[in-house]
Amino acid sequence: MENCVEPSAISVSLAPVPAESRQPNPPPRLLIVDDDAGQRSLLDSFLRGQGFETVLADSGERALTLLPTAKFALMISDVRMPGLSGLETLRRVRQDFPALPVLLVTAFADIRDAVEAMRDGALNYLAKPIDLDELLATVRQATGVTAPALNLGAERKLPPNVIAQSPLTVALFQQIALIAPSEARVLITGESGTGKEVVADVIHAWSTRATEKIIKVNCAAIPETLLESELFGHEKGAFTGATATRIGRFEEANGGTIFLDEIAEMTPPLQAKLLRVMQDGKFQRIGSNREIQTNARILAASNRDLEAEVKAGRFREDLFYRLNVVELNLPPLRERREDVLPLANLFVGEFARNRARLAEATADCLRNYSWPGNVRELRNAIERAVLLSQSDLILPEHLPAKLREAAKHAPPTLSLDMQTMDEIERHAILAALQQHKSNRTETAKTLGISRRALLYKLQRLRQQGFQFE
């Protein structure tokens, strides 16, 4: 929004105005330091979209050569880097540029290092995967920028098969619009049936690679012995049955996007090979010594808690942090009930070709059900109902029995003071935050909601003027 000035506030000065004062203030210049190209790309595209000027460095050594060449308002640096680590870079910056604010980005395992960094003069640290709202708030505070975010350009349009009516879903796709144009790897998490593949499609469609292919691999659906060949290909005669050379999916996705669904099902040896692809983009077909290069953007998905899988030793920690440049957690359907009926009507149109509609009692059944199978279960229920309906009206009797039972046991609708309900929710959130010392993940578990749902509610509380860490 443009700044508006009342006519009475305008003053006229007859003194000459220096030329430099007539120029708008240049945007703050940020130095982004990270050896991971995907992470650099994410921070670069996001912060430039918010009106900042950015300069990129792929190492601590490169950052130290850039600092004397321009005036920087803030340096954002990863902690773990080959050569000079983020902590060593910070200590050298403190010697030569003591007034420069430094923000460190750290993986969970580096928290002790981050605390040490605070003692060495770091402004703050952010844990990976980065919460973009938290990043923006920290950068604005450090640089003194209080203006609202700049317009990000033409509004993105969702595909016709994607519904976003609830505040949670709208916020999710707003974040996707920010990260899609970057080259950052994205980890999509959430319960089965929440639409992780749909989100991957939207990320690709909104990316700079939209004209290229998106290649999808379901790691759980391919036998362990064949998955390596599926991903990386093989040479003729590499193993029994290899009667011809086969191009792998990474090779096919070069220049585009590869979506690895259910990545937690990948075996440790294959995880090690995937890690190398993410580090330098190189791999070999089975039975070949020739290296092949790919620059495919990697999107991954899992319905498991990958942090728990790492702690249990079933998933490589280094691979987890490489994949998890950005994490998108899809809320279950029970947390975004505003989407239920629009989705149901979408599926009615798909299966009945717009010749049928939902009876009001049927809509009540859909609203009152908890949907443990999420969008996939809703789609299956509507397909069944359309098949059983002999008219253009879908009745409750056409739905699965468990949906009808849920409607019978649903509490009656009460006329409640919604402000009072808001107060109860606010009190519960703030109390849980205090109990868990502002740990968002633990707070969400205590409240019984997803982390994304909690972040949305905290954002809404901030807009209402409430302050918390």
Image (spheres, grey):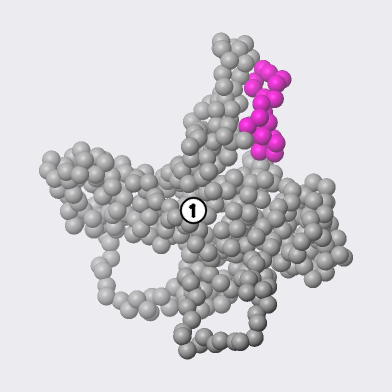
Residue 10 in view (yes/no): yes
Residue 170 picture location, percent across and down: 42, 58
Position of 8 relative to 110 (above/below)? below
> In percent of the image, x 58 and y 39: which residue is there?
297
Q: Residue lying farthest right?
A: 95
User: Is residue 67 rendered to the left or right of residue 326?
Assistant: right
Q: Can you identify the residue that label 1 sits on?
A: 177
User: Is residue 288 rendered to the left or right of residue 165?
Assistant: right
The quadrant holding residue 272 is top right
At label 1, counting other C-alpha atoms closer than 10 Å, the crowd grade (few under 14, some 14-19, many 20 or more) is: many
The quadrant holding residue 197 is top left
Position of 332 relative to 19 (above/below)? above
> In percent of the image, x 38 and y 55: which residue is there?
164
- Identify residue type, mark 1: Ala
User: Is residue 262 rendered to the left or right of residue 140?
Assistant: left
Q: Write down the region rendered in magenta.
A: 272-294
Q: Residue lying farthest left?
A: 391
The quadrant holding residue 20 is bottom right
Residue 414 picture location, percent across and down: 27, 72
Residue 8 picture location, percent across and down: 47, 89
Residue in the foreground of this view, choosing between 377 and 95: 95
Q: Where's the C terminus, which quadrant?
A: bottom right
Residue 119 in view (yes/no): no
> In percent of the image, x 67 and y 45: which residue is there?
37
- Label 1: state its secondary structure: helix
User: Is residue 347 rendered to the left or right of residue 209?
Assistant: left
Residue 133 picture location, percent across and down: 56, 63
Residue 217: in magenta span = no
> In percent of the image, x 42 and y 48: which residue is there?
194
Position of 426 relative to 410 (above/below)? below
